[in-house]
Image (spheres, rainbow, N blue to C red):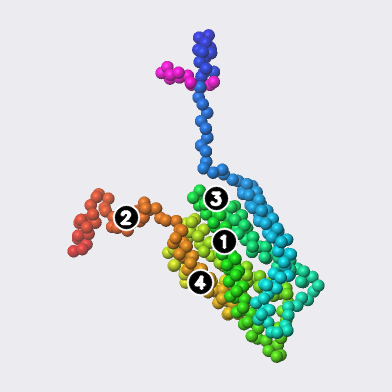
Amino acid sequence: MSPSDSAASAADPAAEAGQPPAVNGAANVPRKKQPAIEQPGKSMGLLDHLGELRRRMIYAAIAVMVGFFVAYQFAEPLFYWLMKPVLDAMPEGVQLQYLSPPDAFFVYMKTAFVASLIVMSPFVFYQIWAFVAPGLYEEERKYVIPLAGVTGVFFIAGAAFCYFQVFPLAFRFFMSFTSEHIKAAFTMTDTFSFCIKLLLAFGLIFEMPIVAFALARLGVVTPPMLRKARKYAILVIFIVAAILTPPDVVSQLLMAFPMLVLYEVSIYVVVAFGKKKPASDEAKDGAGKTSPASEDGTDDADDPYNARHDQ
């Protein structure tokens, strides 16, 4: 390098930095690093999602455990309140039995746990929706807290419907088979398991409108889709009712009827809260249904081929 080139390089800070010299005598202004484009939301990896899921599960477990310790203080009256439809339907003098020493203790523990789960269900469902919220749009996140409350209310409503409507009819039907030669002898464990199975099943099926709302907001289901699938849904509903209930027609119908009503309610929920089709897409669909013009700008009615074809 010649001495003149070295002097020019020393005088030009851009040359020292490895940048091209200014063009047309433009001033050599130091370049500033452009900031990275910010994303609307912080992206989360798999480990972040697992950590968030673990945190939500811990919160839900702590709430259920706190409710369990409180409910265990009233486990015995809660158990008798749960068994009241059974005891009312049983013949006079017949009582529940337990066949091994720890049966009553474990039944009371299960009673306290189920009572805590039902009472704390709004908080548990809130943790579930809060875990799903980061994947939603900003306008959809405002539904998280209302959905958590409504989900818990629907779950409790399903359990209450089972307790006040299904239990009396079902147990009166089961007790109708007793006679002077056949006596009913129910155990605490089996009767409790049967009642809890029905309570949880009815609580879950009452979540059908909530599931329909979530799928509608995601654009997965539409009202025409649900109406078209109604006849298949009726078949599936009766199959699910037959699986979740005892092998008798009464219990199956008592579960299938509210499921049919909830399916119709879900259709109206999708109509009210489903994603609307953009106006531009509707215009395109409407334009696609009309007879397209020919590529050279002439209408099909003016096409000589169509005129000859009509003749």
Secondary structure state at the residue bearing disc 3: helix
- Judging by the rendered image, the residue that carries numbered circle 4 is 260
Looking at the rendering, which quadrant does residue 111 occupy?
bottom right
- Between the C-alphas of marks 1 and 3, the distance is 19 Å
Question: Residues under labels 3 and 4: Cα distance?
Answer: 31 Å
Q: Is residue 222 visible?
A: no
Instruction: Return the residue at label 3.
Output: 135
Q: Identify the residue shown where x is 28% and y is 57%.
A: 291
Which callout, 1 or 2, points at the residue further toward the start of the chain?
1
Q: Residues within 10 Å of mark 1 (few under 14, many from 20)?
A: many
- Amino acid residing under circle 4: Leu
Q: Which residue is mark 2?
A: 287
Q: Splitting the image into 4 quarters, where does residue 193 fall?
A: bottom right
In depth, the one of 12 and 78 nearer the eye is: 78
Crowding at dot 4, Cα within 10 Å, few <14 / some 14-19 / many 20+, comes out as some
At horizontal 70% and vertical 84% (from top left) the residue drawn is: 92
Q: Is residue 284 magenta?
A: no
Dots 4 and 1: beta carbons under 8 Å?
A: no
Residue at mark 2 to residue at mark 3: CA–CA distance:
35 Å
Amino acid bearing label 3: Gly
Callout in the foreground (2, 4): 4
- Position of residue 159 relative to residue 25, above or below, is below
- Element assignment for label 4: helix
Residue at left offset 47%, top offset 19%:
28
Chain-order first, disc 2 or disc 4:
4
Q: Residue furthest top?
A: 3
Mark closest to the chain's N terminus, 4 or 1: 1
Question: Which residue lies under the disc numbered 1?
Answer: 151
* Residue found farthest to the bottom: 180
Q: Which residues are magenta?
A: 17-29
Q: How far apart, in angstroms, are the residues tagged by discs 2 and 4?
A: 38 Å
